[in-house]
Amino acid sequence: MARIVQERHDVIPLLAETFREHGYEGASLSLIGQRTGLGKGSLYHFFPGGKAEMAEAVLAELDAWFETNLFRPLQDEPDAAAAIAAMFRTVDAYFRSGRRICLVGLFALGEPRDRFARAIATYFTRWCQALASALYRAGKDPALAEEFVAGIQGALVLARALDDPDLFTNALARMEARLAGA
Amino acid sequence: MARIVQERHDVIPLLAETFREHGYEGASLSLIGQRTGLGKGSLYHFFPGGKAEMAEAVLAELDAWFETNLFRPLQDEPDAAAAIAAMFRTVDAYFRSGRRICLVGLFALGEPRDRFARAIATYFTRWCQALASALYRAGKDPALAEEFVAGIQGALVLARALDDPDLFTNALARMEARLAGA
DNA sequence: ACAAGTATGTACCGAATGGTACAATTATGG
DNA sequence: CCATAATTGTACCATTCGGTACATACTTGT
């Protein structure tokens, strides 16, 4: 049978999107239920810890994704400049060119920060670390790493505030241009 | 008698801080009540529209403050370079050197964005506008305005995510340095 | 002092919250 | 084919939500 959700793993992206759109508090169990098509029985079967465990799972999955698709390449790719360029492309794709926000950033700003402090801190620390490494190997100033990561987060805020996704793409382009000129 | 809150106007900063720390949804009426020392009777007397009107009032007050202390000077000060430098000082003070987040940014990322869309958009638009004007008059690239406003928002996210306020101050310093070198 | 209007505490409302219990269903392996 | 376990829908729990009603207390002008 073609069920959409068959395992715990399959439901995580749906949870992620729900948290992204409504925040931790705003994502009520009933909303999560209708978004995932799962009743409370199933949800608590997969995530006995309730909403908190769902968010943990989402953050873990997200962290793994970034580790694989962004941080690791930034660190390991021999051609560091190419790795950085690839990062900008991946970031643009991931955030749907500014139409999607960063769940970790949202959590960091809001109430759930304390509860998920470790996951949130790790995410940004690793990103800055990996990018700084690539910048260094590319002969650029590693201090730009913090600036770029913050720039990406800020651009997401601005793009959503002004409802203008182009603003995000442009911001990415300016960062790349800045790098080329440095 | 030394009452802390005597008028509607006096309660707005307390509301602002509550929204800032707990978000729009997280700031429940009972929490607002204990933070302001006001019962529901008083709160609904001052803000018949309930929580939404409280948030509107906070945004309006905040907008007025930025208009007076940031946007207007950026536009009107004859010495544009000095106005920009003053902006960085004011921003650092307002956000308590990274210990405080931007309420408008938080609203922009989260659920309340649609409800308060106009106020949120106006805030960022005006900021970019005013800064671009000052940059132009100072002989700098006006396109930096978006970059700096986004950089400030992103630095606030990062500072809070890593629980490291210095990160914010450093980000501001790097922007100023970048301006000096341009 | 007194009346009028402002301010406020308290009790209450229906709805929604996160979470639990459990019976019924569904799949699976022997 | 059946027993066992994994899965899921439903009813329910106490609590909290935003909001309303209203009686009581304060001020304040006269």
Image (cartoon, coloured by chain):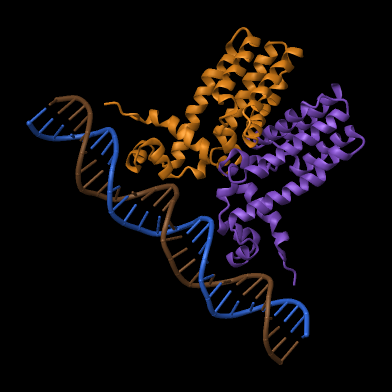
Chain colours: A orange, B purple, C brown, D blue
In the image, B14 versus B121, the foreground residue is B121
Quarter of the figure with residue B160:
top right
Instruction: From the viewer's perspective, tell me whether residue D20 is left or right of residue D2.
Output: right
* Quarter of the image that includes the C terminus of chain B: top right
Please, is residue A181 above or below residue C18 in the view? above
Q: Is residue A154 visible?
A: yes
Please, is residue A2 above or below residue A182 in the view? below
Instruction: Indicate the position of residue A127 as horizontal and vertical percent values.
Output: 61, 24
Instruction: Indicate the position of residue A32 as horizontal and vertical percent values.
Output: 42, 40
Instruction: Indicate the position of residue A69 as horizontal and vertical percent values.
Output: 53, 18
Work out which residue is located at the far right of the displayed protein and give it: B78
Q: Residue at x 89, y 32 (%)?
A: B81
Instruction: From the viewer's perspective, tell me whether residue C2 is left or right of residue A22.
Output: right
Quarter of the figure with residue D23:
bottom right
Numbered disc total:
0
In the image, A18 versus B174, the foreground residue is A18
Instruction: From the viewer's perspective, tell me whether residue B62 is left or right of residue D24.
Output: right
* Quarter of the image that includes the N terminus of chain B: bottom right
Q: Is residue B103 visible?
A: no
Instruction: From the viewer's perspective, tell me whether residue B141 is left or right of residue B124.
Output: right
Quarter of the figure with residue B145:
top right
Instruction: Indicate the position of residue B44 as horizontal and vertical percent values.
Output: 60, 63
